[in-house]
Amino acid sequence: MSQKNVKPTIYLALVDDWELRGDGSGDMERIQFQSMRELVRIFNAHGIKGSFNAEVMQQLSFRKFEGRRPELKRLADEWDAVALETFRQGHDVQLHVHPQWREAQYENGKWLLTADWSILKHDPQDAYRMMETCKEYLEKLLRPIDPHYRCISFRSGAWCIAPSPHILRLLVRLGIVFDMSIVGGAQYDTRHVQLDYTNCEEDFLPYYPVMEDARKVSRQKEEIICVPTNQFYSSRRYIFKKQLGKVRDKVKARLKPAPSVHDNQTGAQNYYQEWAEANPPTSKLRRIFQNSIVPYKSGYHLISDISLLDYELLGEMLESIRRRARATGLSEVPIILENHTKDLTNFSHIERFAADLARAADIKCVTLTQLGRELADGRFFIKTSRT
Ligand SMILES: [Zn+2]
């Protein structure tokens, strides 16, 4: 499996988390349906099969209230239709769960979400029931198109997967082949989410996790695999250039709030800023820095989230992946990217990036289902702490 001095083939999964905002707000038509259709159009134009992690707790809440609220029924029906249309074209749809939708209420045209954002803080039976119900909903929806379809992968809402005495075992019980909730270097301490992935034992290759703490690599084979979501460090040159431009714009705008530079859109709140209320940055300088660099402790660290990266950073990300893949000495390496359709409004960056991927001889775009199959068949090296 291991061949030195060979340019490795990168099995790249373009994975999108498909959902409303964390507090249940957002124009579904625009941030879910239109965005997904546009992304699928781009993928199709370049012969790429993408994957969408559909957040099903939201859909179950819409279904729960649809009898009393016809507008919710219309949206829930369209959710099904768009997911089906995407799946029918060969793209994958997999499992994503945001437990804050548990026992959601709908009042005056707004969702009221009061449950905990971290699935790890829910009782194990409740957590299992939520994941099972979501999985059953997706499988029932998609099996008329592919009778063999099943949920084989998982990404936890707000990345909450470790540590936990039970969550990985619950995923095994559900038949999940691999989890992709670990993203090395991420650290949050906000009102809704607290997690610390700054000391993950593996943040690049697939591995067997310690069953009580997915941040650690197990000594032996386990019944579930972790494939980390990729992350990288942007160049200092990029940061310096953008910061300079940012400060200049700020001065021009007399310190009016400006869009985040990593948002390839026009200033709407992005996924990571949804969490930011807990620890508001104090000084103006600090605010500029945090808004532009993504709220991590280390300013240069970035999740490989397409919706946050412009074309230049997407290029840096790919270079980092190639460099690290070469350093492993392996001939085939699977990589998982992130995306948030809800944060995409300017698709030009991803369009250029997709064209690059389609041309690259060393990159093979795969769906999560394909990745799950290859992992199960032993195509990829899966790390234990002894290897
Ligand atoms: Zn999500």
Image (cartoon, rainbow, N blue to C red):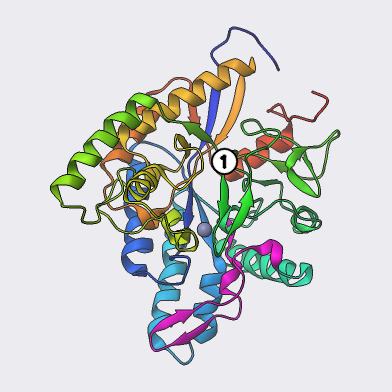
Q: Residue furthest top?
A: 5
- In the rendered structure, the answer to whether residue 296 lies left or right of residue 241 reads right
- The stretch of residues the image draws in magenta is 95-121
The quadrant of the rendering that contains the C terminus is top right
Disc 1: CA contacts within 10 A as few (<14), some (14-19) or many (>=20): many
- Amino acid of disc 1: Thr
Report if residue 256 lies within the magenta region. no
What residue does disc 1 label? Answer: 229
Q: Residue at x 67, y 65 (%)?
A: 131
Is residue 345 found left or right of 185 in the rendered image?
left
**Quadrant of residue 361 in the image?**
top left
Percent across and percent down for residue 375 are: 69, 36
Where in the figure is residue 240, as x and y percent of width and height? Answer: 31, 29
Q: Is residue 155 visible?
A: no
Return the residue nearer the eye: 298 or 64.
298
Question: Image height check: is 387 above or below 119?
Answer: above
Return the residue found at the far bottom: 68
Q: What residue is rendered at 15% in x and 51% in y? A: 253
Furthest-right residue in view? 220
Image height check: is 245 above or below 251?
Answer: above
In front: 103, or 238? 238
Q: Is residue 190 visible?
A: yes
Looking at the image, residue 32 lies above or below residue 69: above
Q: Is 46 placed above or below 271 here?
A: above
Residue farthest to the front, as pictured: 283
Image coordinates of residue 349 in percent, x first then y, are 29, 39
Which residue appears at 44% of the width and 23% of the height?
A: 319
Could you say where residue 72 lies in the image, as x and y percent from the top left?
A: 42, 81
